[in-house]
Image: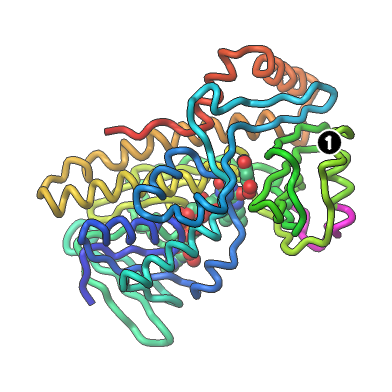
């Protein structure tokens, strides 16, 4: 087979790239390790930055989001022993976020690929990348048969565990990482959510109330990395959540049987550069953020914004100026997201082995935020996501 851009990975980064390239008349083939149903069964992110919302609208993917998504103007913070606090994101930035699930976005992206006749190959195995500094190709097996795609460029959109990042030679690749000793146990429950999305700091650990739609709530509690989902009955989860949220908010929590329960580890990770020869990385293939800042999915869209522009400029204008600056431009927003996600994680979680000094500094960080409009404005600037660069 031959195509202009071979896209490895059919998650949000790969599908959105294929969609934007198609709109510009550029051919691509998406290869995906799983089945479509498997990709669509994964419950992941839920909060979109204003910039991501704009991108979905610009590319005709916002119909359902604008009808069923829930606009979000700020975030509530519960802090043990303190008054509730509201980060007024719209006041400080003039921009509005949106609660709209990755699952629904991915459904709409698959529907668009199918409508547009975009080529997608599922259940690929043993994917390998070749000749990245010459005439690149990708080989793989499907149901025991070997196949090969020749292409002008490869987009590595294959998530944290995919082969693309590892195809950049070890002596070129630099990796930066923090692994946290805890994860988020998340449940989904078919009940109306609390009034607003809320983060909670409690001496027992972080907790969070989120949502997917007016009848679907998503809640999280911090758990040690060693915990297993089987350790957590629904009753145990609800008890922990109630202890960690203030009593005056308990009336807002509608409990019920969980319809999904999983533990997501927290990790900060960046690989640089995001380009090697004809290979370009986008999304989780190049970077991971802890969920606390709700940045992971937004960064995947941000990378695709820069990468699609670079590829379109190459094919339309025969200019590589954006391809050459891709890694540097994408990494500016990546590091800003890494920074706020890391600081929010430190602020809101209990770290094993912390001492009273750590706790005093955390309290002081919260008091500074709650007490200063300047700090709230600065926080909101980062939380909404940096502007895109020209
Ligand atoms: P992915 O969604 O990982 O897609 C990569 C695709 O590549 C996958 O479909 C995978 O099957 C495919 N692939 C892998 N290997 C190969 C291969 N060899 N060949 C072909 N295809 C391959 N972010 C938030 O903001 N909030 C959250 O609450 C949140 N929760 C998360 C929970 C979990 C368990 C995980 C893993 C992530 C979570 N994230 C969250 C992060 C967010 O979901 C990701 O940042 C987002 O999915 C990135 O999109 P992506 O397309 O880059 O990667
Ligand atoms: C979710 C929402 C957030 O605001 C966040 O920081 C992490 C996860 C969610 O709804 O899954």
Q: Is residue 166 visible?
A: no
Which element carries disc 1, helix, strand or loop? helix
- Identify which residue, 155 or 55, lies in the foreground: 55
Image height check: is 300 above or below 123?
above
Q: Residue furthest front?
A: 67
Q: Is residue 67 visible?
A: yes
- Residue shown at 33%/60% (left/top)? 19
- Residue shown at 73%/60% (left/top)? 261
Q: Quadrant of the N terminus?
A: bottom left
Stretch in magenta: 225-236
Image height check: is 114 above or below 164?
below
Q: Quadrant of the C terminus?
A: top left
The quarter of the picture where residue 20 lies is bottom left
Left or right: residue 259 versus residue 387 is right
- Coordinates of residue 333 in the picture (x, y in percent): 41, 35
- Identify which residue, 248 or 77, lies in the foreground: 248
Q: Which residue carries the number 1 mark?
A: 249
């Amino acid at each position: 087979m031959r195509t202009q851009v071979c896209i490895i990975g059919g998650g949000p980064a790969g599908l959105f790239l294929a969609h934007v390239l198609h709109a510009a008349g550029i051919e691509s083939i998406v290869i995906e390790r799983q089945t479509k149903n498997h990709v669509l069964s994964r419950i992941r992110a839920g909060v979109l930055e204003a910039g991501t919302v704009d991108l979905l609208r610009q590319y005709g993917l916002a119909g359902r989001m604008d009808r069923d998504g829930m606009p979000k103007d700020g975030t509530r913070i519960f802090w043990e022993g303190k008054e509730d606090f509201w980060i007024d994101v719209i006041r400080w930035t003039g921009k509005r976020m949106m609660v709209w699930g990755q699952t629904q976005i991915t459904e709409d992206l698959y529907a668009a690929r199918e409508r547009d006749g975009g080529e997608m190959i599922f259940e690929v195995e043993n994917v390998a990348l070749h000749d990245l500094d010459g005439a690149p190709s990708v080989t793989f097996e499907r149901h025991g048969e070997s196949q090969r795609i020749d292409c002008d460029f490869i987009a590595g959109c294959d998530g944290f565990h995919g082969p693309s990042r590892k195809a950049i030679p070890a002596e070129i690749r630099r990796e930066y990482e923090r692994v946290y000793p805890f994860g988020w146990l998340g449940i989904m429950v078919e009940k109306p959510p609390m009034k607003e999305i809320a983060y909670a700091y409690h001496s027992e650990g972080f907790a969070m109330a989120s949502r997917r739609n007016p009848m679907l709530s998503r809640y999280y509690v911090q758990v040690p990395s060693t915990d297993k989902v089987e350790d957590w009955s629904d009753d145990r989860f609800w008890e922990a959540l109630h202890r960690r949220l203030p009593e005056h908010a308990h009336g807002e929590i509608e409990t019920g049987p969980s319809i999904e329960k999983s533990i997501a580890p927290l990790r900060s990770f960046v690989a640089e550069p995001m380009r090697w020869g004809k290979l370009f990385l986008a999304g989780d293939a190049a970077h991971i953020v802890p969920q606390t800042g709700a940045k992971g999915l937004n960064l995947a869209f941000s990378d695709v914004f820069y990468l699609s522009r670079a590829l379109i400029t190459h094919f339309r204008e025969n200019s590589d100026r954006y391809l050459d600056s891709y890694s540097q431009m994408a990494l500016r927003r990546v590091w800003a997201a890494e920074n706020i996600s890391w600081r929010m994680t430190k602020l809101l979680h209990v770290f094993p082995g912390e001492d009273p000094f750590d706790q005093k500094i955390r309290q002081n960080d919260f008091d500074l935020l709650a007490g200063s409009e300047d700090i709230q404005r600065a926080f909101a600037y980062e939380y909404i996501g940096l502007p895109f660069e020209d």
